[in-house]
Image (cartoon, helix red, strand yellow):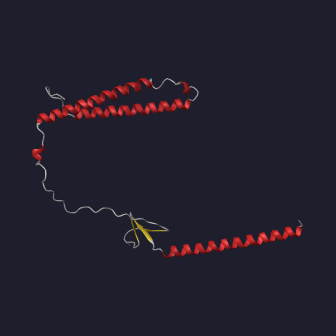
Amino acid sequence: MSRPFLLVQFLLVFVAMKRFLMRVAVGALWVGNGLSAVAADAPQVYRCGSEYTNQPDPKRNCTTLRHASVTVIEGTQVQRTPAVVSPAGPVASESKVDGVEQRQRDAQARAVLQAEWQRAQTRHQALLQAWNQGEPERLADEFRQPTKYQERVAQLRAALQRSEADLAGLQREISRLPAIAPGVAP
């Protein structure tokens, strides 16, 4: 190929690229003008405290929001008048449980909570044994991978903390129940 032929080819490509870039530039200007026209047509949005409005209150310190897209979700209305409830069920005095039945229910609840506390205490003891005062025994693969050992230690620590919190919560629930009266079977 001759040099003039290559020069002509180069000029043709150059002119084509110049046309393309001009079209892109004109398109960008056209889109930009269109967006600014849309933005100019949009109403001003003001923020007055936690309220957004198109009409600012001169008494409040309102700030103009630029290019704001505000979505307003209406809340539920509060009932102004109390609803009238008709007594369809039994009267409150009729629905009360007698003292003996209530003591039996309390005794059953105490027995269930104490059984759960015993199970939690057993799990906690097993965790304490595995914890080995902060130095759990290393497993075979943990000698080569110390990060794996550290992860297991962190998991054991978290499990112990959860277990202690569970035990404390169960103890609180047991202490809330009245003491078991003699002669009441759970």
Residue 175 vertical placement versus 3 (above, below)? above
Residue that lies at the very extreme toward the right in this rendered image: 2
- Residue located at (12% from left, 44% from top): 95
Residue that lies at the very extreme toward the front in this rendered image: 1
- The number of numbered badges drawn on the structure is 0
Residue 171 vertical placement versus 80 (above, below)? above
Position of residue 131 in the picture relative to residue 16 (left or right): left
Q: Quadrant of residue 170?
A: top left
Position of residue 87 in the picture relative to residue 71 (left or right): left
- Residue located at (24% from left, 32% from top): 175
Work out which quarter of the rendered image holds the N terminus and state it.
bottom right
- Residue located at (58% from left, 75% from top): 33
Residue 62 vertical placement versus 125 (above, below)? below
Relative depth, front residue between 6 and 139: 6
- Residue located at (34% from left, 29% from top): 120
The spot of residue 61 in percent (x, y) is 40, 68
Q: Quadrant of residue 99?
A: top left
The spot of residue 54 in percent (x, y) is 41, 72
Work out which quarter of the rendered image holds the C terminus and state it.
top left
Q: Quadrant of residue 101?
A: top left
Position of residue 151 in the picture relative to residue 5 (left or right): left
